[in-house]
Image: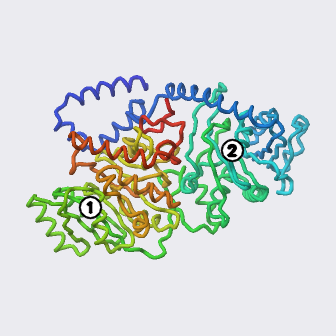
Amino acid sequence: MRAVLRFLLSGFRRLLHVLPDTWRASLRNQHRLMAIYSRALHTSHLFYGTLSARKSQSRYVRLIKSQLQQLAVKEQALAQSLSANCLVQVCDPEGLFTSLQNLQSLKRIKQIFVLCGHDLKNLKCWKHYSKVCFVECHEDIHGELPLIVLRSGELLHEYAVACYLSEPRTQSCVISCDSDSIDEQGARTAPRFYPQWDPDLQLSSGYINSGFCVFGENLQYSLIDAVLNQNDTYSFAMWIAHLYFNEHKVSIHHIPLTLFHRKAIYENNWGEYLSRSIAARQWPFSISSALSRKVATINWPIQSAPFVSIIIPTRNGKDLVETCIQSILKKTTYQKFEILLIDNKSDDLESISYFNFLQQCHSKVRVIQYPFVFNYSAINNFAVKHANGSVLAFVNNDIEVISPDWLTHMVSHVRRPTIGCVGAKLYYPNRRVQHAGVILGYGGGAGHAHKHFPDYHEGYLNRLICTHAFSAVTAACLLIERHDFDRVNGFDEKAFPIAFNDVDLCLKIAELGLRNLFCAEAELYHYESISRGAENTQEKRIRFESELKHLKQRWAHYIEADPAYNPNLTLRQENFAVKE
């Protein structure tokens, strides 16, 4: 069936390429038709954002061999006397003995603690598992050794203990890792490559839910008590989420190596689970229904609604500006804002007339003249001096609002003490993703995660439908508190007059210890670079290469290893495929 679909779609794509440009443009504006076409492309694996299962598995098999060499080195370098304990939570009794057989065979596992009810303790088979002890309270374990946690039906890599113990760490910390699955033939498949610790991704998706290692006796006791009180599939994930709100912040570190394997399949319903569980916890947010029960939509309260200055630079572009500003004025539910339209030497009479009309007829709109050469960074820095808001919203003139609560969601995040810049989820007119976070390293510089994915797609590890951290977000729609903007001296007008100024701003904010956030609930259209045009002249290309050079020199450590990405994923395409 899929082969037939691929054949038909290939023919249809060839037909599209010979149609007149006007016909093709008309077809792209048929959003419902384009949605059907996108779904068909996705199913057939002709869609840009997917690899065939065969190709993906082939890449992963090569990666497994490479990782095995790295892990073997760690195993050989570590003293044979060093060991760890393992805690197994019995979520699936049938998978328990699969896990126990695996753990019993690992030399570096000293004891296996089993969290379960009394009904399993009387089974005669325990004599075959000399390392097994039952846990009914935290006093039943001895916390001097590291504690690796698994759920029943999950297996530990033979060199996992050596890898955990080889990692630099504090006395009390948690170390997580990547994972994969074991299929019916016993092959390792479906790898899951996670970013460095991201509390917002944890709250949204519960992505760290097993396979991590806990160092420190008190931390281990805290885990045992939490799981005994609420022993279910997501107990470990909930405990990890709780660490974010702990008064004494716990160090959480991620190893980009696959150290445990899932043989059991647990239903992914984190959003539903968190909704039920949050009532018993005094966490400073509420949860609303998400598009998928796999994730949770976290609503942070806005204690005192700040005044927002929405800054929109433009040169002419009457139709774009009208669409942009009218969509903001008519659709936006958050009302404490002003719009600063920065006119960069417009010479189109129709545009000038419309800008004058806006100024006269809309109390929320001010038109400010910027009579200098176009420099995106300088224009926005100039605009900030005229802004009245304590929150700044940088918005391109080719943006159109989709979700009325876009500004409410973004403001609620930007007001959090740990958050710096907040970016929106932006679509091309055909509902393909234009921006859902910026990854450093794409093409040697930076690129947009999940670019060209269809709007219905959940993304890699649900990252398209989860609000979570990225190293950078685009300034096509970006919020930041004014005092944070001032702390880093705004946009860099000299090094980044046109491109990468938003990436540079975000990374400067990250260096302050703040996290930059992609807000999946803030959805808008972005008719990308329509007014400014493409980088298609030699002068523009020279300028772009200069800005790229500055980015590589200033932020080489992010480009080399973006903490919001994973080194096992490709940097050649923006699709989260296994690296080549």
Neighbor class of circle 2 (other Cα within 10 Å; few <14, some 14-19, many 20+) is few
Residue at 31% across, 72% down: 387
Residue 122, image x, y percentages: 90, 44
Residue at image x 50%, y 64%? 299
Report the front residue among 59 and 100: 59
Q: Are marks 1 and 2 in contact (CB under 8 Å)?
A: no
Question: Could you tell me if residue 400 is visible in this image?
Answer: no
Q: Position of residue 191 (x, y in %)?
A: 58, 35
Q: Earlier in the sequence, mark 1 or mark 2?
A: 2
Q: Which residue is mark 2?
A: 167
Tell me the quarter of the picture where residue 439 sits: top left
Check disc 1 and report its element: helix, strand or loop.
helix
Q: Is residue 416 left or right of residue 410?
A: right
Q: Is residue 580 toward the left or the right of residue 218 in the image?
A: left
Q: Residue at x 47, y 71 (%)?
A: 302
Label 1 and label 2: CA atoms lie apart by 46 Å
Q: Residues within 10 Å of mark 1 (few under 14, many from 20)?
A: many
For mark 2, give the secondary structure: loop
Q: Amino acid at mark 2?
A: Glu
Q: Amino acid at mark 1?
A: Ile
Residue 541's spot in the image, x, y percent? 26, 41
Residue 215 higher or lower than 514, as above or below:
above
The vertical placement of 239 against 440, above or below, is below
Q: Where on the picture, by quarter, is residue 43?
A: top left
Left-right relation of 194 to 302: right
99 lies above or below 144: above
* Mark seen at residue 379: 1
Image position of 110 (left or right of 486): right
Q: Is residue 542 visible?
A: yes
